[in-house]
Amino acid sequence: MSRCFACETLVGMPSSVAPHASLQRIKAPIIGAPGNAVTHYLQYRCSVCGSWFHQNDLEGSPPGLWSACESEASVENQATQLAPRRER
């Protein structure tokens, strides 16, 4: 599925730009040891086109920018396809 115009416009914009109205915040992954845990991005999903986005902080990748990412379903499907097949 291709990105809607609002999502396409957001890619590469500074993270200070607010998410558009159809982006729903999904989660803020916490990375690191409990005493030193950090979040480098907020994850969003568009309710119109289904695109996934990261609102990266200065430690994110790319730093300080909005980036499009693969859908979680797509990542799960790839992992399933790469897993060794079990004989029944």
Image (tube, helix red, strand yellow):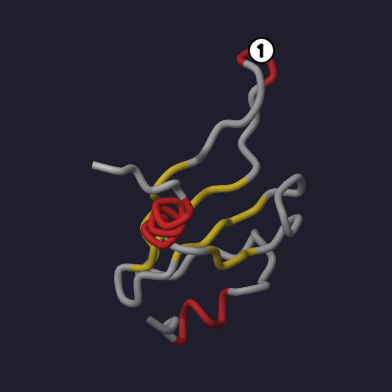
**Which residue is at a point 65% across and 30% down the rendered structure image?**
38
Residue 67 falls in which quadrant of the image?
bottom right
Residue 54 falls in which quadrant of the image?
bottom right
Label 1 Cα neighbours within 10 Å, binned few <14 / some 14-19 / many ≥20: few
Note whether 1 is above or below 70 in the view shown. Answer: below
Q: Say which quadrant the N terminus sits in.
A: bottom left
Residue 42 drawn at (x, y percent): 53, 48
Q: Is residue 68 left or right of residue 88?
A: right
In depth, the one of 33 and 75 nearer the eye is 75
Q: At numbered mark 1, what does the secondary structure look like: helix, strand or loop?
A: helix
**Which residue is at a point 64% across and 23% down the rendered structure image?**
37
Residue 74 drawn at (x, y percent): 41, 62
**Which residue is at a point 42% across and 57% down the rendered structure image?**
81
Note whether 84 is above or below 50 in the view shown. Answer: above
Give the residue type at disc 1.
Gly
Furthest-left residue in this view: 88
Query: Residue at label 1?
Result: 35
Residue 71 falls in which quadrant of the image?
bottom left
Note whether 36 is above or below 60 in the view shown. Answer: above
**Which residue is at a point 66% across and 25% down the rendered structure image?**
32
Furthest-front residue in this view: 87
Q: Is residue 56 left or right of residue 45?
A: right
Note whether 29 is above or below 66 in the view shown. Answer: above
